[in-house]
Amino acid sequence: MPSEIKNLSEKLRKGEITAVQLLNDTYKTIETKEKKINAFISLTKEQALVQAEAVDQKLKNGEQLSLLVGIPCAIKDLICVEGTKTTAASKMLENFVPPYDAEVITRLRENGAVFAGKTNLDEFAMGSSTEFSLIGPTHNPLDEKLVPGGSSGGSAAAVAAGMVPYALGTDTGGSIREPASFCGIVGFKPTYGRISRSGVIAYASSFDQVGPLTRTVEDAAIVYEAIAGPDPKDSTTLSGVVPPVSPTLRDGVKGLRVGVPKEYFGEGVEKEVAKTAKQAIEKLRENGAIISEVSLPLTDVALAVYLILTRAEASTNLARYDGVRFGLRSGGKTMEEIYRKTRGDGFGVEVKQRIMLGTFALSSGYADKYYKQATAVRREIAKEYANVFEGVDVLVGPAAPEVAFPIGSKTDDPLRMYAADVLTVPVNVAGVPAIVVPCGRAHNLPVGLQIIAAQGREDLCFRVGATAEANNE
Amino acid sequence: MTETQKNTIVPHLADLARLELSAKEEKRYEKDIAEIIDYVGKISEIEASSKPLTTTISGVSNVTRVDKVEQSDLADELLVCAPKTRDRLVSVPKIL
């Protein structure tokens, strides 16, 4: 599929459209569709106009400019953009305005990007449906009775609805990939540490990663290359130059070894979804890939490991919301009252539950059995992936065990909700990169094909993803 | 975990986590939290060593830098974020 970013970039360079016109068109589209979709928490019109005007000036001066210059994008409201409300979709940060940019935002600014607005998410990135939010649910652009997936549902919906050509999301257990699958677009999560988390509101620090949501694989590659790379402000970032992914994008899959884990097609995966994914894998075989069945037995415990570790890390990360230095403050007679009332008031139902579970996993008498054991099993899961990648180049399977489900259908049943991420979660546990590419439909709704590679091999995700995308045209 | 432990765990966890919950919330959480704790218990069936403790999966560890003092001009802007201030200080109820 041709890159939309390149197409818009060319139009801007040739003077066929100005950045300000492009921005106005973007807002027109957003305004037409927003009532039905509810993708945005806030539109950053003033800032965006200033950015677009600066771009038009640069274009007039004939400066050499990056591909992303002048192109409007949307940012998940978990990522700090200086001077704009960054709420995490939570009452706790309802009026929080960060005085600094996240590093990924700084890099996009350096590339001349224009930020059209901040998108809806599940509160503090905790959810798989973008229903647990201060502003209510985002609706799937393909069917407004359905969820767009989560937690980056606002970003996914904004891209799927044609409002912006790309958006940033974050992915801790599938929060970019599952909405990409549900909305029929491309979503990418890099190797853990590939993209800086500085300025990204933390959920689970050893799982969180920023990534792009786009309508084409090439666009995801362009955005990824613009924001990836080490950052001294985030010491978990991987050092060294980021290997480019664009040069091998169109190399095809001839001779590539593609592993199909039998656990990714288990009982929990809906029949039609499995069928659609299998058909997409067959097409890769026709393209010359060497397909083989593999096994990842620890897939069965990956969700449990993930539930323990992310909740433990979240309980620590969310301890900072205490009503003292920023965010909501409720109650005021004593410090204890401020802590308890602020946190009782400011956090939503799902967030409080996760904090308590995390507290449990780390508490005296249970930490060994739950937290420590989970870290040990995590290492085994990572080893299992590393071993399988000795024999194959990528793993493929459906990104989600089902298609987009109706709004409100899972909000009362946490374990059923978490099951939506059963195929994406192991990837974060192992810290490896994965892309999701639309590969067909089931029950007339999008199915995403997930392509996973070894740590550091983002190039393989994009290369196989581009082929799968071409097969789906 | 015994049934009694399960029934008292929510108030205990809410206390540890400094969360004020309504009686209705406590009831709701009792069931959900017990279910999830039950579900995640399956990890004990896996043989795995927790030594050394793995806290990150990318292999990055102990990243250090030179202890160099840098100027930050964010102090006043950060104060704007505080719920209550006085002079250039964050104001809170007295602790002692």
Image: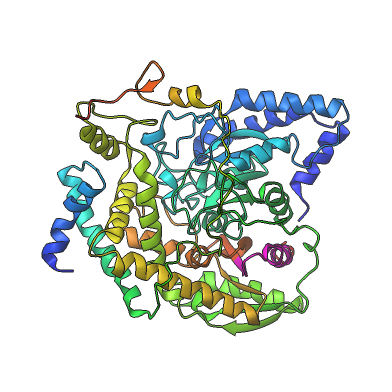
Residue sitting nearer the eye, A397 or B60: B60
Which residue is situated farthest in the top direction here? B87
Judge left or right: residue A50 versus residue A169.
right
Q: Position of residue A289 (x, y in %)?
A: 73, 78
Q: In the picture, which quadrant includes the N terminus of chain A?
A: bottom right
Tell me where residue A223 appears, x and y as whole percent.
69, 48
Q: Position of residue A439 (x, y in %)?
A: 63, 65
Asked whether A386 falls inside the magenta stretch, the response is no
Is A451 included in the stretch rendered in magenta? yes
Q: Residue at x 68, y 23 (%)?
A: A50
**How is the structure coloured here?**
rainbow
Location of residue A206 in the rendering, given as x and y in whole percent from the top left corner: 48, 57
Q: Quick check: A380 left or right of A55?
A: left
Q: Which residues are magenta?
A: A450-469
Residue B52 to residue A295: above or below: above
Q: Number of callouts in the render? A: 0
Q: Quadrant of residue A420?
A: bottom left
The quarter in which the C terminus of chain A is drawn is bottom right
Question: Is A422 left, or right, of A233 in this rendering?
Answer: left
Q: Overall secondary structure of the magenta stretch? A: helix
Regarding residue B50, the answer to whether it shows in the image is: yes
- Compared with residue A79, is residue B54 higher up or lower down, i.e. above or below? below
Q: Is residue A260 visible?
A: no
Where residue A434 sits, quadrant-wise, is bottom right
Q: Which residue lies at the image location 41% right of the left edge and 31% below the top edge?
A: A94
Residue at 20% across / 56% down in the picture?
B30
